[in-house]
């Protein structure tokens, strides 16, 4: 985006923020690329080197479980030092001082929580890859322990209850987390501004939330480096690098809107820049 266009877009973005009463952010892998975590759809993404292991195979076969853990630790090692980026910081501030009531994320990297945002404001649709859970009793297992167990016994870890232990993420073929989906739906229906950031918006059912928000009367902003299938539905499309776009808003000291002083979102008009 040309810098003049970028500044006009930023003004428009801030204007929408200042007029809303309740904003919800919906984030995808694009918010974490500047932190060193590759996204899924970019060419040569490390996430696509292997055909995914379906959940049913993970459940059925020990060799698949060992392979899944091998791949997971190889990916984890690639971005072990990842820290929250400028996009995460912007959302953290907007949640702490502004009208952002929730961050619905498809990401599994835990970087929103690391940014200091209140944990109860983060809704993880695809789980969290920074720890593991027993599929039977749900108890939490630390990845360092899982690694040690696999190295020591060459067997996939089991819980004390006998259940299979799996990274706390949602695999292909695994049911979406019921509670997170319900919370995401509630947050989406309650907001008057929905901001999709860094997602190709092609992974369903997650990508249905921007549409639900829009159909419920919320204003929809899409901030992404490339076109998405929902751009036509958006009131404002921002084609920009996420960190570059969001960072100056806080760095320049633009006054954050507060939920109490917000005026009616109806003052917003459809804008595509
Ligand atoms: P995606 O890879 O499909 O789309 C990411 C989008 O972000 C792309 O359109 C890309 O052009 C854009 N993008 C990348 N860097 C950007 C930047 N700096 N500025 C602006 N735009 C940028 O990601 P998705 O829609 O989240 O779907 C991927 C799936 O894979 C999700 O289900 C997610 O669970 C998983 N995933 C998660 C992570 C993570 O936790 N960080 C990483 C990869 C994949």
Image (cartoon, rainbow, N blue to C red):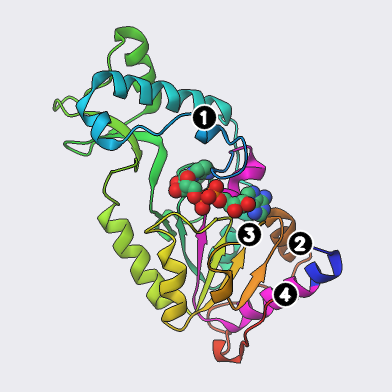
Q: Quadrant of residue 16?
A: bottom right
The answer for how far apart the CA atoms under marks 3 and 1 are is 24 Å
3 or 1: mark nearer the eye: 1
* Alpha carbons under labels 2 and 3: distance apart: 17 Å
In this picture, residue 182 sits left or right of residue 33: left
**Whether label 4 touches label 1, CB < 8 Å:** no
Q: Inspect the magenta stretch and tell me whether residue 34 lies in it.
A: yes
- Residue 101 visible? The answer is yes
Most frequent secondary structure within the magenta stretch:
helix
Which of the two residues, 85 or 32, is positioned nearer the viewer here? 32
- Residue at the spot of label 4: 273
* Residue to which mark 1 is pinned: 49
Give the magenta-colored segment's residue range: 8-37
Tell me the distance, in whole angstroms, between the alpha carbons under discs 2 and 1. 35 Å
Earlier in the chain: of badge 3 and badge 4, it is: 3
Q: Which residue does the numbered mark 2 point to in the structure image?
A: 248
Task: Answer with mark 2 or mark 1, whichever residue precedes in sequence.
Answer: 1
- Residue name at image x 38 percent, y 34 percent: 131
In the depicted view, which residue is nearer to us: 36 or 122? 36
Q: Earlier in the sequence, mark 3 or mark 1?
A: 1
> Which residue in the protein does label 3 denote?
224
Q: Quadrant of the C terminus?
A: bottom right
- Residue 61 in the image: x percent, y percent? 23, 23
Q: Toward which corner of the image does residue 159 lie, by quadrant?
A: top left
């Amino acid at each position: 985006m040309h810098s003049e266009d970028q500044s006009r877009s930023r003004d428009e973005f801030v204007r929408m923020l200042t007029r809303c009463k309740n904003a919800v952010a919906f984030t995808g892998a694009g918010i974490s690329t500047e932190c060193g975590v590759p996204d899924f759809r970019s060419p040569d993404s490390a996430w696509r080197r292997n055909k995914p292991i379906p959940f049913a195979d993970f459940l059925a076969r020990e060799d698949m479980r060992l392979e899944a853990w091998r791949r997971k630790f190889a990916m984890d090692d690639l971005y072990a030092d990842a820290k929250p980026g400028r996009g995460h910081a912007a959302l953290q501030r907007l949640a702490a001082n502004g009208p952002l009531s929730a961050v619905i994320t498809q990401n599994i990297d835990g970087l929103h929580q690391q940014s200091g945002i209140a944990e109860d404001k983060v809704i993880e649709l695809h789980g969290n890859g920074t720890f593991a859970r027993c599929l039977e009793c749900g108890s939490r297992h630390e990845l360092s322990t899982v690694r040690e167990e696999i190295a020591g016994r060459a067997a996939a870890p089991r819980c004390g209850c006998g259940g299979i232990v799996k990274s706390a993420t949602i695999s292909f073929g695994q049911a979406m987390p019921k509670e997170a989906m319900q919370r995401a739906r509630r947050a989406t229906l309650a907001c008057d501004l929905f901001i999709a950031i860094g997602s190709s918006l092609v992974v369903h059912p997650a990508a249905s939330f921007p549409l639900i928000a829009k159909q419920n009367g919320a204003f929809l902003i899409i901030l992404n480096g490339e076109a998405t299938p929902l751009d036509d539905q958006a009131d404002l499309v921002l084609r920009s690098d996420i960190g570059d776009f969001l960072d100056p808003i806080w760095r320049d000291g633009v006054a954050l809107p507060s939920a109490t002083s917000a005026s009616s979102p109806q003052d917003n008009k459809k804008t595509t820049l």
